[in-house]
Amino acid sequence: MSRQASAPAAAARAIDTMNAAVGRAVAWLALVMVLVQVVLVVMRYVFGIGSIPVQESLVYAHGALFMLASGYALMAGSHVRVDIFYRDARPRRKALIDLLGVLLLLMPVCVLIAVTAWPYVLRSWAVREGSAETAGLQAVYLQKTLILAFAGLLFLQGVSMAIKAVLTLTGRPTLPGAPADGPPEDAPPADGPGR
């Protein structure tokens, strides 16, 4: 593989590796959410105790899970795709569809989200915005920061997809065995279990 082809492929691999690591790490939040919900139900209906911070922690975990795992979901093919032209297409046509989708839809939307969210997040950080509830978690500014992380991780995954699409269209291979060739081997199948 030429040095010119290896640099973009290595960049795509690095982005995929980062998004895979973030996705795997935040996936544990799903288990945390289940356990916290069980604790909340037991506290409320067995002991008659309510806890606003514990209830709000579910919202924080839910937001973090979906915002931070978005790049990983896109990389693994777990996102929603209208599969009219894509499913039966050859690799070059899939690469062209991916490239156009990334350049014309994904990247502009990520930039729009980031530009729109930037002042919103800055204002929240300026006042260290907290919960509207007195006893609530006083870290709403951290939760709002996830909007920027979402846009950044998704944008980066778009860069990786664009690199892989261009490499496919130009007939240059991506790094063999790299996540850039598809979802990691331990990733769940996009169609769900048992298919």
Image (tube, helix red, strand yellow):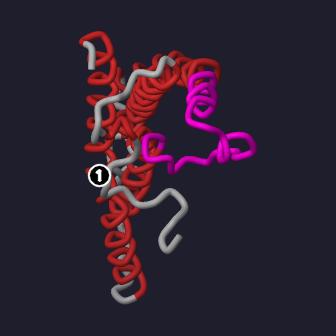
Residue 150 location, x and y as percent? Answer: 43, 34
Query: Could you tell me residue 10's position as x and y percent?
Result: 27, 24
Q: Residues within 10 Å of mark 1 (few under 14, many from 20)?
A: some
Q: In which quarter of the image is the N terminus?
A: top left
- On the rendered structure, is 83 left or right of 113? right
> In the image, what residue occupies the spot 33% across and 47% down?
23
Q: In this view, does 23 lie to the left or right of 132?
A: left
Please say whether residue 148 is visible from this viewpoint: no
Q: Which residue is drawn at 45% across and 31% down?
A: 154
Q: In which quarter of the image is residue 34?
A: bottom left
Q: Residue 12 appears at what percent x and percent y? A: 34, 26
Query: Residue type at mark 1?
Result: Arg
Farthest-out residue, right: 84
Residue at image position (26%, 44%) is: 21
Indicate whether 149 appears above or below 126.
Answer: below
Pointer 1: what residue? 24
Nearer to the camera, 31 or 1: 1
Residue 195 showing in the rendered view: yes
Asked if 118 appears above or below 177 in the picture, the reply is above
| Local SS, label 1 | helix
| Residue 188 image-quadrant placement | bottom left
Q: Which residue lies furthest to the bottom in this view?
A: 46
16 to 123, vertically: above or below: below
Magenta residues, as a range?
74-101
**Residue 91 among magenta residues:** yes
Q: Residue at x 46, y 29 (%)?
A: 161
Q: Does the magenta stretch include residue 165?
A: no
Q: How many labels does the image show?
A: 1
x then y, percent, for residue 68: 38, 41
Please state which of residues 25 and 117 is positioned toward the viewer in this rendering: 25
Q: Which of 45 and 17 is in front in this view?
A: 17
